[in-house]
Amino acid sequence: MNNPFSAANTLDPEAGFTQTPSVSQAANDLRAAAGEKAREFVHTAEEKATALKDRAVESAQQFRDTAAERASQFKATATEKALHFKESATEQWQDTRVKAKELHVTAEDYIRQNPTKCVLSALGAGFLIGLIVRR
């Protein structure tokens, strides 16, 4: 087998290797390389975490802006509907008052024209109600 590390002339002295590599030197080189990779990994992870945080803040701001806009639209619509319902209820209340007054006037006129009939009807209704309540 031809192992490139077994030949002393294949090692590059400018890369930091000596002509006669030792196990401790190889371990130190490996440790240094691992430390450098770990620092790079930490740096990359910090950059990605910062970018993710920035995107999350931006998304939260967009969500907050959208929610505020929707809330103001909902408020405006609800106010408009409430005003419409209030106007409608006021109108219906006025109509009901007018009809009640008309009914009251009509009932008074009928009672004045037929007093005997009304008194006898009231006595009969009172008698029936009394029988029903007793049972």
Image (cartoon, grey):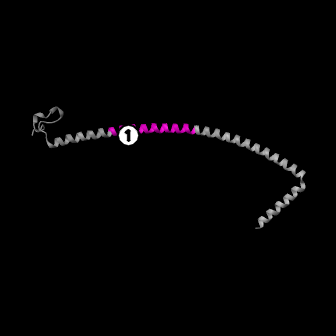
Report the amino acid beneath label 1: Ala
Q: Residue at x 83, y 48 (%)?
A: 104
List x then y, in percent, for residue 44.
Answer: 33, 38
Q: State left or right for residue 123 relative to residue 76.
A: right
List x then y, in percent, for residue 23.
Answer: 15, 43
Quarter of the image for the N terminus: give it. Answer: top left
Q: Quadrant of residue 120?
A: bottom right
Q: State left or right for residue 80 relative to residue 25.
A: right
Q: State left or right for residue 12 relative to residue 97.
A: left
Q: Tally the numbered discs.
A: 1
User: Nearest the camera: 71 or 118?
Assistant: 118
Q: Quadrant of residue 47?
A: top left
Quarter of the image for the C terminus: give it. Answer: bottom right
Give the answer, above or below, for where 20 lies relative to 134. above
User: Nearest the camera: 109 or 61?
Assistant: 109
User: Nearest the camera: 60 or 97?
Assistant: 97
Judged by its main secondary structure, the magenta piece is helix
Give the answer, above or below, for where 54 lies relative to 122. above
List x then y, in percent, for residue 134.
Answer: 77, 67
List x then y, in percent, for residue 95.
Answer: 76, 43
Q: Residue at x 30, y 40 (%)?
A: 41
Secondary structure at numbered mark 1:
helix
Q: Residue at x 41, y 39 (%)?
A: 53
Q: Residue at x 21, y 41 (%)?
A: 30
Magenta segment? 43-72
What is the crowding at mark 1: few (fewer than 14 residues within 10 Å), some, or many (at least 20)?
Answer: few
In magenta segment, residue 125 = no
In magenta segment, residue 71 = yes
Q: State left or right for residue 81 relative to residue 114.
A: left
Furthest residue toward bottom: 135
Q: Quadrant of residue 19?
A: top left
Where does label 1 land, which residue? 49
